[in-house]
Image (cartoon, grey):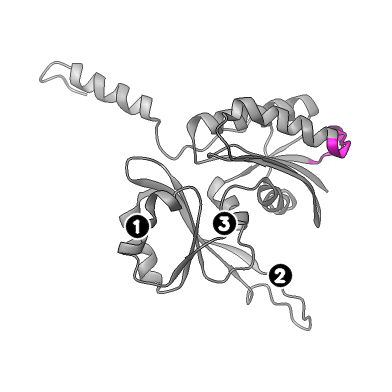
Amino acid sequence: MRVLAIDSSGLTATVAVVEETQTVAEYTINYKKTHSQTLLPMIDEVVKMTELDLGTINAIAVAGGPGSFTGLRIGSATAKGLGLALNKPLIHVPTVDGLAYNVFGCEDIICPIMDARRNQVYTGIYTFSKKAGEKEGRNLVEPVFQVIKMQMAVSIEELAERLNRYRRPVVFLGDGVPVFRELIAEKLQVPYSFAPAHVNKQRAAAVAALGSIYYKEGRTETAMEHIPEYLRISQAERERAEREKEQKPAGTKI
C-alpha cells in the first residue's frame, strides 16, 4: 500500500510518501514562506526524487483541520485536485490526531496544541495503550492509538483544568507550545514535558501512517466529498457578524 500525504494546516508545510512499513520520502518546510508557494513544488520534488508514478498510489491522506484557514484551504484544494486527476480516494486525517500520532507508543497523555488565537488552542487528548495491543501467546505488542477527547477549540485555562483531572503525566507538542509555555507552567499541576524538535510539529509521514490505518478501516472519501474541518468560524466571518449586529436598528429582531 502506498499513500501520499499532505499537511499544510499550520506553520509547517509537509509532504510524504509512505509504503506499509517505510517512509519513502518526506519533505518538510517551516520557514517564512506561504504554503501556496511551497506545497506543489514540494510534491513535485518528492515525485522527481523518488521517480514516483502518482498513478501507483492507493490514496491521498490530507490533514483536514483544524488549523490555519488559509493553510487548510490550500491543502484541501491540492488534495482534491490530485484526487480528481488521479481518480484516487482521499483520507481525511484530523490535524490534531496526526500531530498526536508523532509520539507513537507514548502511554502518557499526549496533548497537541495549535495556536488558535484569541487565547484559544486547537487541541485533543490522546494516548497509546500497550495493554490494548497485547495478543495472547505473542510477545509482539502493537500499541493502540486512543482518542480520549476529540479535537476541539478551547482556552488554555480550560485545557489545563481538564488535564489536571486525569492526574497523569502530559506530553505537549505543536506550534502552541512556545505561545503558551508560561501559562502551562502556571496552570498545570501534573508532571509534563515537551516533545523534542524532530516530532513537535506536523509531519506528513505521521498523517500517512495514521491514514493507512483509516484506509484499511474503509474510512475514505471522494475528492468531491472532502471538506476541511475548521471547528470555528474565521476571523473575517466573526468581524462581519459583529458589524452586521452593530448596524441593525434598535429593536430589530435577529
User: Which amino acid type is marked by label 2?
Assistant: Glu
Question: Counting residues from the N terminus, which is met first, the one under dot 3 or under dot 1?
Answer: 3
Spot occupied by residue 113 in the image (x, y as percentages of width and height): 46, 52
In the rendered view, tell whether residue 166 sits above or below residue 3: below
Marks 2 and 3 sit apart, C-alpha to C-alpha, by: 16 Å
Q: Name the element at disc 2.
A: loop
| Badge 1: residue crowd in 10 Å (few <14, some 14–19, many ≥20) | few
Residue lying at the far left of the rendered structure: 250
Query: Label 2, label 1: how many angstroms apart (C-alpha)?
Result: 35 Å
> SS of the residue at dot 3?
helix
Q: Is residue 161 left or right of residue 95?
A: left
Q: Depth-wise, is mark 3 or mark 1 nearer the camera?
A: 1
Q: Nearer the viewer, residue 54 or 83?
A: 54
- Look at the numbered discs 3 and 1 and tell me whether their residues touch, using CB distance below 8 Å: no
The vertical placement of 171 against 130, above or below, is above
**Mark toward the start of the polypeptide (2 vs 3):** 3
- Locate residue 241: give its quadrant: top left
Q: Tell me which label, 2 or 1, sits earlier in the chain.
A: 2
> Mark 2 or mark 3: which is in front?
3
Point 72% across, 33% down: residue? 42
Q: Mark 3: which amino acid? A: Ala
Q: Quadrant of the C terminus?
A: top left
Q: Which residue is mark 3?
A: 100
Residue interval drawn in magenta: 49-58
* Location of residue 137 with respect to 226 vertically, above or below: below
Q: Amino acid at mark 1?
A: Glu
Q: Which mark is residue 142?
A: 2
Residue to which mark 1 is pinned: 182
